Image: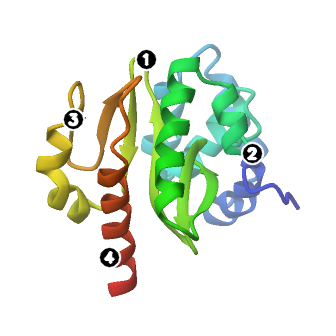
């Protein structure tokens, strides 16, 4: 039995139980598609055989040669894989939060750096070509801070996240207020 939570084969037992055939059968069907692209492989399993997106993705990505979904084990590994601009901006974001909010755990989830309180994610970041996207994991918190987030020069705000440009002069007050609101939301539940 696989013990690495990022190991795609850990889904195979559930897939076999739900669909009544060994994982090797489904991998064989994928092999029959030849050089098909990811969407076609996913459609074969989801539309053709009723697979959930998660189970289809586990088989397709395993078939495509990616046996694990885990790439980074720590924030430092994630930073090392980014451009210097992305790494520096993200480090500054986490440092600003860490200097004002105690007790948050630095974790990697979905291959991105996150901070969490016990089991709940509080804030996470991802890097694009010219900006960092920041997710407070709460539409309510996003709504509460929409005006302040919208005032970030060179930034962008959507329903669930906001972005800041590389080199953003980190607003530690804004980040601390945002994380405090998310923590308050979690304790109110």
Q: According to the image, what is the colour scheme of the structure?
A: rainbow
Q: Residues within 10 Å of mark 2 (few under 14, many from 20)?
A: some
- Which residue lies at the image location 41% right of the left edge and 23% below the top edge? 167
Q: Which residue is mark 2?
A: 73
Residue 98, image x, y percentages: 54, 56
Q: Residues within 10 Å of mark 4 (few under 14, many from 20)?
A: some
3 vs 1, front mark: 3
Do callouts 1 and 2 mark residues in contact (Cβ within 8 Å)?
A: no
- Judging depth in this view, the residue of 154 and 71 nearest the camera is 154
Q: Which residue is mark 1?
A: 129
The local secondary structure at tag 1 comes to loop
Q: CA distance from mark 4 to mark 1?
A: 32 Å
Name the secondary structure under disc 2.
Answer: loop
Residue hosting label 3? 152
Q: Is residue 97 above or below residue 118?
A: above
Residue in the image at 52% along x and 47% along y:
94
Q: Give x and y (percent) for residue 146.
A: 15, 50
Circle 3 or circle 2, nearest the eye: 3
Which is more N-terminal, label 3 or label 4?
A: 3
Q: Are marks 4 and 3 in contact (CB under 8 Å)?
A: no
- Along the line of sight, which residue is nearer the eye, 15 or 90? 90
Residue found at the very far bottom of the displayed protein: 188
Q: Nearer the viewer, residue 167 or 121?
A: 167
Q: Position of residue 31 (x, y in %)?
A: 70, 25
Q: Quadrant of residue 162?
A: top left
- Up the image or down, 35 lies above or below 182; here it is above
Do labels 4 and 2 touch, CB within 8 Å? Answer: no
């Amino acid at each position: 039995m696989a013990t690495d939570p990022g190991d795609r084969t850990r889904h195979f037992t559930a897939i076999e139980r739900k669909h009544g055939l060994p994982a090797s059968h489904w991998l064989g069907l994928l092999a029959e598609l030849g050089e098909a692209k990811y969407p076609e492989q996913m459609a074969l399993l989801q539309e053709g055989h009723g697979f959930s997106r998660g189970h289809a993705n586990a088989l397709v990505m395993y078939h495509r040669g990616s046996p694990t979904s885990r790439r980074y084990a720590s924030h430092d590994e994630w930073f090392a894989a980014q451009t210097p601009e992305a790494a520096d901006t993200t480090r500054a974001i986490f440092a600003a939060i860490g200097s004002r909010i105690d007790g948050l755990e630095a974790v990697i989830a979905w291959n991105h750096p996150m901070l969490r309180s016990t089991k709940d994610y509080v804030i996470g970041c991802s890097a694009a070509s010219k900006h960092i996207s920041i997710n407070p994991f709460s539409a309510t918190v996003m709504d509460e801070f929409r005006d302040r987030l919208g005032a970030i020069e060179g930034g962008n705000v959507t329903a669930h996240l906001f972005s800041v440009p590389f080199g953003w002069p980190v607003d530690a007050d804004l980040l601390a207020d945002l994380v405090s609101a998310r923590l308050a939301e979690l304790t109110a539940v």
